[in-house]
Amino acid sequence: MMKSFLIIIIFLLNLHVSHAQNFSNVEDLINNAIRDNYFPGAQLLIANSKEVIYTGYFGKHEFNPNSINVSRETIYDLASLTKVIATTTAIMILYDRKLIDLDEKVSYYLPEFSSDDKINITVKNLLLHNSGLKAWLPFYKTCKNKSDIYNTICSEKLDYTTGTKYVYSDLGFILLGLIAEKISQTSLDKFCEENIFAPIGMSYTMFNPNPPYQELAAPTENDNYFRMKQIKGVVHDESAYIMGGVSGNAGLFSNVQDLNLFMRMLVNKGYYTDERRMNAKNQTFELIQPGTIAFFSQLFSTTGYDNSRALGWDTYPKPNKYPSQCGTIISRNCIGHTGFTGTSIWYDFDKDIYIIFLTNRIYPDRNNPGIFNFRPLLHDEIFKTLGYN
């Protein structure tokens, strides 16, 4: 009887193993990219709305055999993932509370932003990156503080007529961060901590990491043009740095474990589970209303140009000089975003799969485009491993 029982157990174990995905090809891709100096280390998490499918930690903080190993506690400078994890989510929450009107003019919230060419720019234009604002300005050459940057944006002439095309703009998201602060009457970092990160339990996610967390941060660029030092645990983005480390376009630090908590909330239509069991009576809470999640995460219909943006988020991107960063197998029904430092998140609604990939590809400098050809291969290999072609 015991022998038969053991045979059944062994059979069931073998059955389970035979259906488990083998991520060795994915791991080989990442390890080869590290060998080829695309980035010194990485974190990868693959999950769906119910469970984590795979988590991996690769390489080191630096291209140095004696450097710190990347671990689950390592935090990365998220760069432009700040735009969706912090700023867009803050706008969602304000929208839920009926404190912001996306069709309202920016000048209603920021009166200084009211010159003739900017008077018709709405909050929605900022979210869609079709405001007419320039993509980027070298604020570090002329600005000393947050007020200088704001005044410069307000005085800068538009590059094109509002609403006529898409130009990805840091300036627009700097303004969105300022709008969130104006409405909430608190700083963007404090608003996000109190209304997003703390409720979900994202304990490794923050602007301006304090010294213990700075030590956990993977270094970014060896800055030889502005700050003249190796950047570690301090925001890499120059504009966010001038603004005190807190900006709507950049400044956030996190890791895949925390971002998994965020994405789990997002793909479960705004609901999250209190993993820390702080409330014994009710473990499931609504952070954002389901209708708001749906509204912000769908491809937005525009007139006059071919759009690939949702509100804040990107969808399947239009071709540029590099292949689509989410690969070719992901469905067109997806949202995602990338960050300059080598970070990305993509979610496939049809397959119910999200992929969080974090690196410090700009260490020791930004002149390393390897990740742009690597990242599409990574996403395609993940989907192949999961049984999609």
Image (cartoon, grey):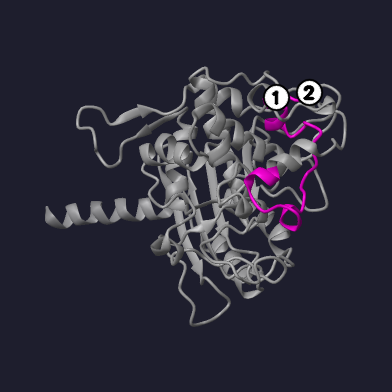
Residue 264 visible in this rendered orientation of the protein: no
Q: Residue at x 61, y 55 (%)?
A: 241
> In this picture, which residue range is highlighted in magenta?
121-149
Badge 2 amino acid: Ile
The quadrant in which residue 147 appears is top right
Q: Report the Cα–Cα distance between label 1 and label 2.
A: 7 Å
Q: Residue at x 58, y 65 (%)?
A: 30
Q: Secondary structure at mark 2?
A: loop
Residue toward you, 107 or 12: 107
Q: Residue furthest left?
A: 1
49 drawn magenta: no
Q: Position of residue 89 (x, y in %)?
A: 53, 33
Badge 1 amino acid: Ser
Mark 2 Cα-neighbour bin, 10 Å: few <14, some 14–19, many ≥20? some
Instruction: Answer above or below: position of 246 versus 371.
Output: above
Instruction: Answer above or below: position of 363 versus 246.
Output: below
In the rendered image, which residue does mark 1 sit on?
107
Q: Position of residue 60 (x, y in %)?
A: 51, 72
In the rendered image, which residue does mark 2 sit on?
119
The quadrant in which residue 112 appears is top right
Q: Secondary structure at mark 1?
A: helix
Q: Position of residue 196 (x, y in %)?
A: 44, 37
